[in-house]
Structures are given as structure tokens and as C-alpha cells.
Amino acid sequence: MAPDQMATCHARAFAGQGRAWSMAEFAGLLESPLVFAVGDARAFALGRVIADEAELLTLACDPAHRRKGLGRARLAGFEAEARARGAVTAFLEVAADNLPAHALYEAADYAEVARRAGYYARGTVGALILRKAL
């Protein structure tokens, strides 16, 4: 998946929720051999594995393609690639007010392990840190 496609999908997915990531930011992340992406222009997951821990950097689904199982499929793809790279645990951050994402991650057996108050720039929205054994 190309960085420009990722930036477009990310901007659509997070419209009104803060600053979307730029094409240059995606390109810079993908330069690292530790970073990987799964998906396509409709939905993608971007992650990295360091030692035996995986981090889901972002999961984005274009609103025109929501409610079709793409988020669940991209999350499963992220987990499979992370396991293939040697990860035994996955972590992610999600905005405390992103209820659809909470439902997705809960259904995939992620559990809250910490919180960050006021983490997101769009005000007083905190972040939940979730973890899953792979």
C-alpha cells in the first residue's frame, strides 16, 4: 500500500477528530524495516514489531467502507504479521471516546492496561492503552 493511499484513507477515517497523518509521515514510518502495513485503499493497519512486542500504530477504514468487516480483517492481518515477526504481545492506544473502536478491540480480546489523560490534541480526550497476548 502506498503512503499517499494511506494518507487519504486516514484523513477520511479520522475527519473531525484531529489532524490526519500526512503522506510524508507514512512514508517515513514505512522506511523502517520494523514497520509494516496490511490492507488496501479502503482500510489498513500500520504496525511495528520491536523484540517480541507489537504496536498497532493506526487502524483506518474509509467511512464509505465501514460495517463490512474490513476493520476486523485488518486487525487480524496486523496480528498475523506481528506473530510472523516474532511478537508475543500486541499493544495499541485508542481514544477514550472512540466507542466503535472499543467494540472492535474488545471483540478481538484486547484488554485495558492503562490510561493517558488528555492525550489527544482535540481537547480533554484521553487514551486507553490496550494489550493482547498473541
Image: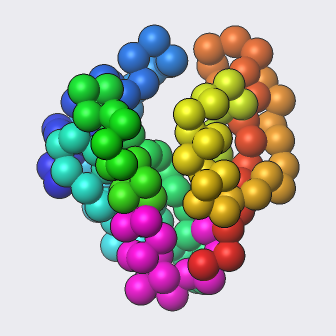
Magenta extent: 76-92
The answer, for residue 10, to whether it is visible in the render is no
Vertical position of residue 109 compared to residue 42: above or below: below
| Residue 41 highlighted magenta (yes or no) | no
| Residue at 51% across, 87% down | 86
| Residue at 61% across, 68% down | 90
Q: Is residue 87 left or right of residue 124?
A: left
Image quadrant in which the N terminus is located: bottom left
Q: Is residue 18 left or right of residue 122?
A: left
Q: Nearer the viewer, residue 71 or 20?
A: 71
Image quadrant in which the C terminus is located: bottom right
Q: Is residue 21 left or right of residue 54?
A: left
| Residue at 62% across, 14% down | 122
Q: Is residue 114 left or right of residue 97?
A: right
- The number of callouts visible is 0
| Residue 84 highlighted magenta (yes or no) | yes
Q: Nearer the viewer, residue 107 or 84?
A: 107
Residue 110 position within the rendered picture, expressed as x and y whole percent measured from the top left: 68, 59
Residue 10, quarter of the rendered image = top left
The answer, for residue 51, to whether it is visible in the render is yes
Residue at the limit of the structure toward the front, as seen here: 68
Residue 12 position within the rendered picture, expressed as x and y whole percent measured from the top left: 30, 23
Residue 67, quarter of the rendered image = top left
